[in-house]
Image (cartoon, helix red, strand yellow):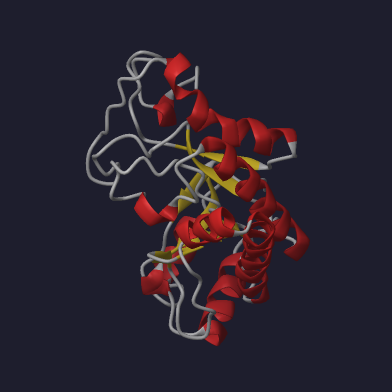
Amino acid sequence: MSLGPLMIDVAGTELTAADREILAHPLIGSVILFTRNYLDPTQLRALVDEIHSVRSPALLTAVDHEGGRVQRFRPGFSALPPLRRIGQTYDTDPQVGLAMARSLAWLMAAELLACGLDFSFAPCVDLDSGLSEVIGDRAFHARGDVVAVLAVAYMHGMRDAGMAATAKHFPGHGAVVADSHHALPVDRRALIDMDQDLVPYRRLIANGLPAVMAAHVLFPAVDAVPASFSRRW
């Protein structure tokens, strides 16, 4: 049985019979875990092993584990700083900032891989425009060129540990106020005005970026549907 296109979640810290039945459905291909699914590294490893045992080939397991506000597993894991801290360090000393990006990405990925997870949805490569509270300190920097070089270093750190990177939120979530978890943000810029937002993606793709997470943001000057549903984007 091949993996299906859907990523779903589970309710608790271990699988129920109902979870197993749903995960065995051919449309399911992966599971995203949250804080509610975590007690400690031993429990997490057991849960991930349970998920992987449901199907062959094994379902993929993922988590949002960037650091700062967005770190789903805390006790037993290193406390990772928000990505903004890396950008601030880069402004003071570029070489130290690049090394920090690579080493923190390696640490994040290595700790998750040790618990059996397949990947983390990182890095966030949105620009810190000062508008979006849901992005804010999750962004490396306000400048696209700085985000690009730090994101490439971060991707390489994840790769060093053995994990594929996922850049998000394409083509950009930093220039809208609304939180796309609760509303549909609308970014009315023309495509030509989004060049800085796209610089990190161009640089990452040129360096072998494995995956992109689309933003649930509407860009009406580019397409009539949100980027997450857009064939054009």
Relative to 101, does residue 155 appear above or below in the rendering?
Answer: above
- The foreground one among 220 and 204 is 204
Query: Could you tell me residue 216's position as x and y percent?
Result: 36, 35
- The foreground one among 181 and 136 is 136
In the displayed structure image, the side of residue 128 where residue 23 appears, left or right: right
In the displayed structure image, the side of residue 184 where residue 68 appears, left or right: right
Q: What is the quadrant of residue 60 in the picture?
A: bottom right
How many numbered discs, if any? 0
What residue is at 51 percent from the left and 44 percent from the top? 125
Residue that protrudes farthest toward the front in the picture: 92
Query: Could you tell me residue 52's position as x and y percent?
Result: 62, 66
What residue is at 66 percent from the left and 39 percent from the top? 204
What residue is at 55 percent from the left and 44 percent from the top? 147
Instruction: Inspect this view and state whether residue 229 appears.
Output: yes
In the displayed structure image, the side of residue 178 where residue 76 appears, left or right: right
What residue is at 45 percent from the left and 23 percent from the top? 194
Instruction: Inspect this view and state whether residue 64 appears.
Output: no
Relative to 185, does residue 211 appear above or below in the rendering?
Answer: below
In the displayed structure image, the side of residue 232 where residue 153 appears, left or right: right
Query: Could you tell me residue 157's position as x and y percent?
Result: 70, 59
Q: What is the quadrant of residue 69 in the picture?
A: bottom left
Relative to 219, does residue 41 appear above or below in the rendering?
Answer: below
- The foreground one among 79 and 195 is 195
